Image (cartoon, rainbow, N blue to C red):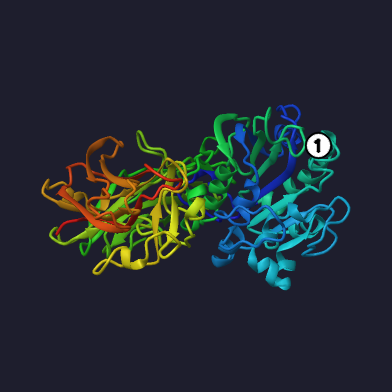
Amino acid sequence: MVRTHRPAGAVLGGAGADPAHRVVRARRDPQLTRTHHPAVRLADAGRATGGPVTSYQRVENQRLCDWASPTNCITSTSCTATNNGLGDNLDAIGKPWKQYIQSQTSNCQTTSSGNYENDDAPFYYAAKMKNDTTYCAAHWQPLPQLLDTDLKSTATTPAFVWADADSCYDMENCGIASGDTWLSQTLPTLFKSPAWTQQKSLLIVTWDEDGSNAPGGFGPGQTNQVATVVVGSQGTVKAGYQDAKRYDHYSTARVIEGALGLTATMTNNDKWATPYNEVFTSTGSTGGNTVTVTNPGAQSATVGTAASLQLTATDSDPSRTLSYTATGLPAGLSMSADGLISGTPTAAGSSTVTVTGTDATGAWGHPRPTAGGGSAGFTYGISSDDSGSAYTLPIANPDAETDTCGSGSGGGGYPVQGWTATANQPQQVCYGSPTYPTAAQGPQAPAAPGDAFFDGGPYASSQMTQTVDVTGQATQIGTGTLPYTLSGWLGGYSTQGDNVGVVATFLDASGASLGTATLAPVTPAQRNNRTELIQEQATGTVPVGTASVQFTASFTRQAGTDDDGYLGDLSMSFGS
């Protein structure tokens, strides 16, 4: 159950959810129909509104990837997550959360007993849960604590709830009827709770395994498709709606993190997942009113120059007075309660702003998408106050220094961070690894050598990409004279021809290409047949209409077993 007192971000999946319950039934999905599903039957009976997501894919062990540690997938209870997960990120912003499991007999129960299995508790893998028993006991409790105590008031209901059946009632050991029984006994208590009847709440019922073949129905003959039902209170979910688009557990992570205001801590897995926005309404109400905020379209301003924008909205009850809040405003800007965004921008860049209008009944609304848009909100681009100054594009992890690195050989590198792998999996390799470049053979001053570089991994070819928004530079780009410099350190191993090339594609607002800048692969001859990285540059003029730049690094192996095309310290700047 996710509790955000206002809709958060551009992810409609959390729109208006004050709490959100996520009830997870592990193991086997019997390919339930709408008439089979107790959650849907209860919704149809008028207790809530919702419907199924009908093309939802599970991923092996993804349950632990999503919740315990969104970038490290864990498969053993002896392991501990090495990076922050959902619980850690909720702690950081002060939102309470708990996981509850049926047949658990004590708080922080780390050993299995009866039908209770400790590996059904994904948050157990967080370092704080394993190292702090007091903290663990406060966040991992038997299911009756939720049903008999915590749901009694909105004050005691956590912002996020993970509730799980035991190994019998999750359909793994005792069949479909046992799961139906558990839902029919558990959900009515939730639907009668103050958090559900008085606030906006979201319930997601899903599975993590399909079919019936042991173990867990994974492998030949299985579709990896599981049932998922989304149920919302207070008009947040379209009643009876069925969504046939393809989603997975990362989609659910994307929805929940968006609702909880955790978009800044998303990893690439969930950041680029498709949220099931289609099932949600764009407005919410506890009193029958409908609020609609007018989308002002893309906005622009300049660093150091005062800006002002008045937002407007309509209420189905014209007598109501609306108040406004906003998320994602550029630095230096703020919003008043009457909907006026004002101030003086202090930094160049681009932000996605979401404005929420609310009336006294609790009805609320986001700006509806503009034509061709897919998110509820608008872009606010801030350009530099000096067209002659250089602007460095904020490439994510341009030098393989994000997170950690590995030894490289035979796939021993660390999976690339901050980029999307579009062909196989490029990796981050530590300088000085056996048979790999040392720091002295990498970027040199004034570049920062760092500790790591990218290579292509144990594949014949691999590729990674990312796109950087540059709408904040629209004014300078519009002159048609804005210069760019693309720079990177490229190299390879000894006399081998393994290589990497980089292409920067200038895209307009629709995603169409306006031109490219290229760093060609470095040949062994250019390296004097030495193992090293050398600096390559490309210059030109930014095409008018450029709204973003897509960077693509393509690694190619020509000899040996590992792709020894090396890349480090990639950068691009506009201006001089």
Q: Quadrant of residue 203?
A: top right
Badge 1 marks a residue whose secondary structure is helix
**Relative side of 173 to 312, left or right:** right
**Between 167 and 160, the one nearer to me in the picture:** 167
Badge 1: how crowded within 10 Å, few (<14), some, or many (20+)?
A: some
**Relative side of 94 to 39, left or right:** left
**Relative side of 216 to 541, left or right:** right
Instruction: Name the residue located 36 percent from the left edge and 59 percent from the top edge.
Output: 399
Q: Residue furthest right?
A: 114
State whether residue 561 appears in this view.
Answer: yes
- How far across and how far down the image is residue 345, in percent? 27, 62
**Relative side of 211 to 488, left or right:** right
- How far across and how far down the image is residue 212, in percent? 77, 32
Quadrant the C terminus occupies: bottom left
Amino acid of disc 1:
Asp
- How far across and how far down the image is residue 354, in percent? 41, 50
Q: Quadrant of residue 547?
A: top left
Q: Which residue is mark 1?
A: 180
Q: Quadrant of residue 337?
A: bottom left
Number of numbered discs visible in the structure rendering: 1
**Between 424 and 458, the one nearer to me in the picture:** 458
**Between 221 and 69, the one nearer to me in the picture:** 221
Q: Is residue 88 above or below residue 522?
A: below
